[in-house]
């Protein structure tokens, strides 16, 4: 049975380095709300702009965690992913996390067929099969490694198909595919590991919900699609 599940997963979600930008041609904006312990604390928006074969995906994220009325953790970030057809050619982001600046500058090197990264946590090259870890792109469920959109660090990952589920989101019932996404290297400190539950709507190629536990229970919920 396990072999059958794995085989079906590979058929439905083949591993490939392309970004499937055509799946998002009808979208101009995805709005996700961020919750911690059931309380709305911020947002994560994605904007899609197209010109010929070029697509620009802009990512805006902002949230703050308060304790007894005082802000104890906050993040504000802006990033841009640029694609030529399905190939990511650059990514740039700036993030302010608790008044600490973080950044990523990534370029696709056509000669080496690799990504060159200069980030606040990593400088070097990586395979073009690595994906920027943003929730708009369902290719994150196919990749073997992801690049932090905030710092540029690279983590190997293992994605497991759990099964088909029905979830209630903003009063609407969706039939979705449930996955877990975890770090391959379990020697990484627990607070640095990837450990997500992801609910994917195959019908319209969107990730509807992401949850994880770290200093509380967090959820990213897709509220609106334009």
Image: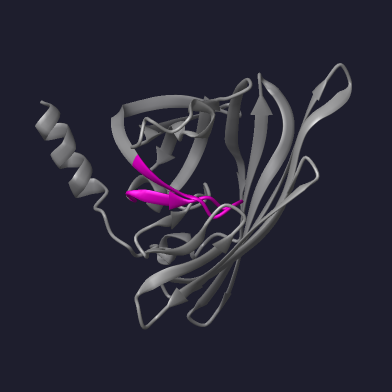
Q: Is residue 212 left or right of residue 112?
A: right
* Residue that appears at 36% across and 42% down: 157
Residue 34 drawn in magenta? no
Residue 163: image location, x then y, percent: 29, 28
> Residue 219 versus residue 117: which sits nearer the camera?
117
The image quarter in which residue 65 lies: top right
Q: Is residue 39 above or below residue 121?
A: above
Q: Is residue 33 above or below residue 40?
A: below
- Please provide the residue range marked out in magenta: 143-157
Residue 72: image location, x then y, percent: 80, 28
Q: Is residue 79 left or right of residue 175?
A: right
Q: Is residue 27 left or right of residue 99?
A: left
Report whether residue 84 is seen.
no
Task: Pick out the residue farthest to the top.
Answer: 68
Report whether residue 98 is seen.
yes
Residue 164: image location, x then y, percent: 32, 29
Task: Pick out the residue farthest to the right.
Answer: 69
Image quadrant for the C terminus? bottom right
> Residue 98 versus residue 218: which sits nearer the camera?
98
């Amino acid at each position: 049975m396990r072999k059958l599940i794995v085989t079906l997963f590979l058929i439905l979600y083949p591993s490939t380095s392309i970004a499937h930008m055509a799946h998002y041609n009808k979208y101009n904006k995805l709005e996700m709300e961020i919750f911690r312990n059931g309380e709305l604390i911020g947002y994560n928006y994605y904007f899609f702009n197209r010109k010929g074969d070029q697509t620009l995906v802009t990512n805006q994220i902002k949230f703050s965690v308060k304790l007894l009325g005082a802000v104890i953790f906050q993040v504000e970030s802006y990033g841009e992913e640029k694609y030529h057809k399905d190939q990511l050619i650059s990514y740039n982001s700036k993030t302010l996390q608790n008044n600490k600046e973080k950044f990523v500058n990534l370029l696709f090197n056509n000669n080496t067929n690799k990504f060159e990264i200069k980030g606040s946590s990593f400088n070097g090259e990586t395979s073009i099969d690595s994906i920027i870890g943003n929730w708009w792109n369902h290719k994150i469920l196919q990749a073997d490694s992801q690049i932090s959109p905030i710092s540029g660090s690279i983590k190997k990952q293992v994605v497991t198909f759990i099964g088909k589920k029905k979830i209630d989101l903003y009063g609407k019932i969706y039939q979705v595919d449930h996955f877990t996404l975890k770090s391959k290297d379990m020697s990484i400190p627990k607070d640095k590991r990837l450990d997500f539950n992801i609910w994917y709507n195959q019908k319209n190629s969107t990730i509807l919900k992401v949850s994880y536990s770290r200093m509380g229970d967090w959820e990213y919920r897709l509220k609106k699609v334009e």
